[in-house]
Image (tube, rainbow, N blue to C red):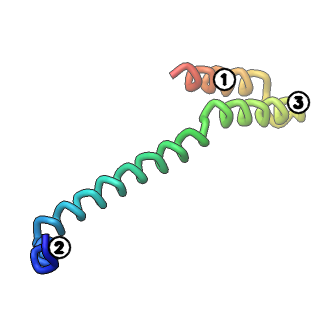
Amino acid sequence: MNAKTLQNLLNSTFVYWIGLGIAIVILGIAVHYLRAWFRDSDDPADKTDEILDDMEELRRQGVLSEAEFRSIKSQLSGERKT
């Protein structure tokens, strides 16, 4: 292959579109892994446990009644199962 033929190949739109397609695929894979990484680090079960601990502390302090605490606890338990 001589230099002129190689230059014509590199300047062709076909090579441009192939390169663009590869770049889009690589970008899509990167976005997928980034979203999965952020999604995995945000565990809703941890938040539910934290909320329940906070509500239990409020019950101990007298801010929440026993009935209110049981209601919140049952609602959070329902969320945890789904």
Q: Label for residue 58?
A: none
Q: Quadrant of the N terminus?
A: bottom left
Q: Which residue in the structure is indicated by mark 2?
A: 10
Q: Residue furthest front?
A: 2
- Mark in front: 2 vs 1: 2
Residue 72: percent from left, percent from top: 67, 27
Q: The residue under label 1 is which amino acid type?
A: Ser
Q: Is residue 40 left or right of residue 70?
A: left
Q: Is residue 61 above or below residue 31?
A: above
Mark 3–mark 1 distance (CA, rounded to whole Å): 15 Å
Residue at 49% of width from left, 42% of height from top?
A: 36
Q: Is residue 40 left or right of residue 15?
A: right
Q: Is residue 68 above or below residue 6?
A: above
Q: Which residue in the structure is indicated by mark 3?
A: 60
Is disc 3 placed on a helix, strand or loop? Answer: helix
Residue 64: percent from left, percent from top: 79, 32
Q: Label for residue 71?
A: 1
Residue 14: percent from left, percent from top: 11, 65
Q: The residue under label 2 is which amino acid type?
A: Leu
Q: The residue under label 3 is which amino acid type?
A: Arg
Pick whichever, 33 or 51, lies toward us: 33
Mark 2–mark 3 distance (CA, rounded to whole Å): 74 Å
Choose top left, top right, bottom left or bottom right for residue 13.
bottom left
Residue at 59% of width from left, 24% of height from top?
A: 80
Q: Earlier in the sequence, mark 3 or mark 1?
A: 3
Mark 2–mark 1 distance (CA, rounded to whole Å): 69 Å
Few, some or many residues within 10 Å of mark 1 (<14, 14–19, 20+)? few
Q: Is residue 3 above or below residue 24?
A: below
Is disc 2 placed on a helix, strand or loop? Answer: helix
Few, some or many residues within 10 Å of mark 2 (<14, 14–19, 20+)? few
Residue at 10% of width from left, 74% of height from top?
A: 5
Pick whichever, 23 or 3, lies toward us: 3
